[in-house]
Image (cartoon, rainbow, N blue to C red):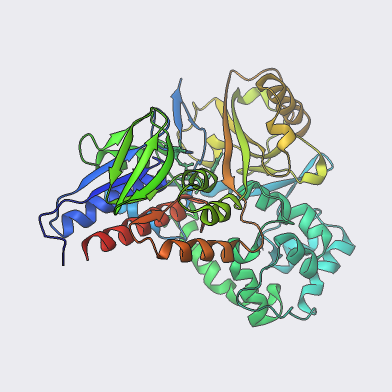
Amino acid sequence: MADSLNQCKRILIIGGGVAGLAAAHRLTELAAAAARPLDLKLIEGLDRLGGSIVTRRKDGLLIEGGPDSFITAKPWGLALSRRLGIEQQLIPTNPACRRTFVVRRGRMYPIPEGFLLLAPTRIMPFVTSRLFSWPGKFRMGMDLLLPAKPLGPDDDESLGSFVRRRFGREALERVAQPLVGGIYTADPDKLSLRTTMPRFLEMEAQYGSLIRAMRKQMPAARAAQANVDSGARYSMFVAFRDGMDTLVNALADRLPTDAVQLGRSAETIDYVDTTWRVRFRDGRHESADGLIVATPAHVTGGLVRDLDATLADDLAAIPYASSATLSLAVRRAQLGRLPDGFGFVVPFSERRTIIAVTFSSIKFEDRAPADRILMRAFLGGALQPDVYALDDDSLYRAVMTDLRELIGLQGEPEFTDLYRWPLSMPQYPVGHLLNVRRIEQRLAARRTIAFAGNGFSGVGIPDCVHSGEQAAEKLFAALHE
Ligand SMILES: Cc1cc2nc3c(=O)[nH]c(=O)nc-3n(C[C@H](O)[C@H](O)[C@H](O)COP(=O)(O)OP(=O)(O)OC[C@H]3O[C@@H](n4cnc5c(N)ncnc54)[C@H](O)[C@@H]3O)c2cc1C
């Protein structure tokens, strides 16, 4: 073809979060495997790489401003760590206390053993749990009798509607909303089940009841858990011993010298005579044969508006919420009672400031000196934009009020660290999959541009790694066929 073997294609990546970095790294792998030269530039708006991944170390504390771990059930995070040679640095969650508590009328209740996100899979812990009322338990048991709702493969439903339909309002308010709130910071009545947890829709279609489906699948899940409990290398979530920025640094180290430029924000994207032209806020332009845009979907929408207004509208239709994390280090003696687990979640119906708290130094080893507890409050999200809007001092005071009342925290913390994440968490509304399909169809005609990042097919680190790697593969193939 026209591409002579020696012709070096210029590839530009905008956005240096984990998706953009994974894309860049995958391109270096593909170029090396095909023995092709690579002219690669990754341009990031901030003065650091990593996007939502930020690790800070201070006085023996290891503070994660954004993600503190990633899930191992999705393979792409682990697979990348292996290829980067940092797999040995992964540590599991503390096996001694893998429990989460839920706040109910100001008190802590453990989520019953065997309760998997939406549904109970074990009878006794569920029946004896004081988190649910008897009418609530009875209503949840109705799942065994209620018929399945016929849904086509493209039909979608909100998580809230699904849980209310199968398990009742109490299950939604006391468990599903706060647990999902902790993951997506989302409003369950808007969140697409088809995008976020399609397995539950499939289970309903196949077994008629989720409880029945989960119990059928329990032997496999229990075997996996036994594997973990018996000291297998990976737990459901893993972190890097020295912090999540281990991944960012390892990726950056693998990129060609001078490939990364920091502190340059892209403003518009144009396509002229088979060349991509990107204008930056500093007034300068960059040209490339291939382009990967790995910014949040709403930013990507703004960048491509002059190129394709319909595509921009579809991207802008992916809502994002703002959230914040406040890490606090306290002496053990300052805490009256500490629930025996990784942390707790707070249902929206409790009307508190905090969405969830992780006891970071209990969940993972080496996060704080032995006589200190490092904890982290998760704040804001789609349901509580008013909390995110508070100034730093008011936010701190509101969090302290919650912690005093909920876990008996006394005095002031020795150290605090607040991170704000404006419009960083996509919300995947009902119908999101069809929107993503429309975006892909519009992109199909433009083979030398690809989008990556958390706006499309998953918010977790493994999903973002996957989206970056897929974008790199698409682009590499299009440029070298
Ligand atoms: C508080 C918090 C906690 C989380 N916890 C977890 C967790 O425990 N586990 C997990 O798996 N996931 C977690 N997530 C989700 C996960 O961290 C993110 O979805 C993921 O890191 C997003 O990666 P990304 O590359 O798609 O986007 P980002 O990290 O947002 O990166 C996008 C990059 O693009 C840059 N950019 C934006 N506009 C421009 C422009 N115009 N020009 C140039 N550059 C630009 C940004 O500065 C940024 O660096 C969490 C997220 C948050 C916010």
Q: Is residue 269 left or right of residue 345?
A: left
For the point 19% across and 48% down, the residue is: 38
| Residue 294 % position (x, y) | 42, 47
Residue 408 in percent (x, y) is at 74, 28
Q: Is residue 138 left or right of residue 197?
A: right
In which quadrant of the rendered image does the C terminus lie? Answer: bottom left
Q: Position of residue 95 (x, y in %)?
A: 52, 49
Q: Is residue 475 left or right of residue 114?
A: left
Q: In percent of the image, x 29 and y 36: which residue is there?
A: 260
Q: How many marks?
A: 0
Q: Quadrant of residue 341?
A: top right
Residue closest to the far right: 135
Quarter of the image with the N terminus is bottom left
Seen in the image, is 210 located left or right of residue 259? right
Q: Is 327 placed above or below 467 here?
A: above
Q: Choose between 94 and 305: the one closer to the eye.
A: 305
Q: From the viewer's perspective, is residue 429 above or below residue 394?
A: below
In the image, what residue occupies the spot 31% across and 45% down? 12
Name the foreground residue: 292 vs 169: 292
Q: Is residue 124 among what the camera can see?
A: yes
Residue 88 visible to an observer of this rendering? no
Asked whether 372 or 389 is in front, the reply is 389
Residue 300 image point, x, y percent: 48, 46
